[in-house]
Image (cartoon, rainbow, N blue to C red):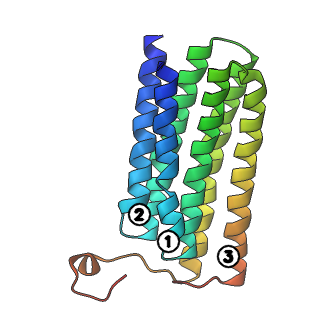
Amino acid sequence: MSFLQWITIFVAISLALPFWRVARGFTIYDRMVGISVVGTNTVILICLVGQIYGRIDMFVDIAIAYAMLNFSGGLVMAKYLDTTGGEPR
Amino acid sequence: MFVAKTLMVIGTALLFIAAIGVNRLPDFYTRAHAATKPDTLGLISLMLGLSIYHGFDLSSVKMLLIVVFVALANPAATHALGKAAIHNGLLPVTLKQLRGEGEKP
């Protein structure tokens, strides 16, 4: 396999690991942290897959949109938990 | 090409360290630390390596735009989450709790 395919496999492994924290997470905040890590890894994975397929000019726009959605989703959830007083444990 | 591959290997190692730290650290605040700093630096390094690997183009400029945006946005989102946690009374873990003397965190 080529170099980019090995990089893609290791990024996919480090995308799959925080799902344990999302499923187990003792508080709701731990789950949000796991979701943030998964989103960051997904942005990189989209760009790597676009580079492998040779269509990076199309995939990089999807990556920009995904990064913006990840940021706004995390910020909205943080403000919601701050105002409503989510369970501390 | 050597610079691009070195940057991509460093970024992959940092992302793997961030994934291990999110699973293994004992507290929400330490987990937020592991989710923010190695993850952001891994994305910066890997995107810089990918844009050098691709060559100068409109797509590599867009990758640098992703780098700038995520370097500003990812710590801000995690900081807002930590502020929500400390406002709702989530206490950080102490050294006694880590040694198993106090109550469980």
Nearer to the camera, B6 or A82: B6
Q: Amino acid at mark 1?
A: Gly
Badge 2 element:
helix
Q: Give me the disc on residue B30.
A: 2
Q: Amino acid at mark 3?
A: Leu
In front: label 2 or label 1: 1
- Would you call the spot at circle 3 few (<14 residues within 10 Å), some (14-19), or many (20 or more)? many
Q: Which residue is mark 1?
A: A25
In whole angstroms, how far apart are the C-alphas of marks 3 and 1?
A: 16 Å
Badge 1 element:
loop
- Would you call the spot at circle 2 few (<14 residues within 10 Å), some (14-19), or many (20 or more)? some
Q: Which residue is mark 3?
A: A81
Chain of the residue on which disc 1 is drawn: A
Nearer to the camera, B30 or A17: A17
Q: Amino acid at mark 2?
A: Thr
Residue B3 at what x, y percent from top left?
Answer: 45, 15
Do the residues at pointers 2 and 1 share their chain?
no
In whole angstroms, how far apart are the C-alphas of marks 2 and 1?
A: 14 Å
Chain of the residue on which disc 3 is drawn: A
In front: label 3 or label 1: 1
- Position of A68 compared to B37: left or right? right
| Residue A13, placed above or below residue B64 | below
Chain of the residue on which disc 2 is drawn: B
| Residue A64, placed above or below residue B64 | below
| Residue A46, placed above or below residue A19 | above
Name the residue rendered at 63%, 11% in the picture: B55
Name the residue rendered at 28%, 81% in the picture: B97
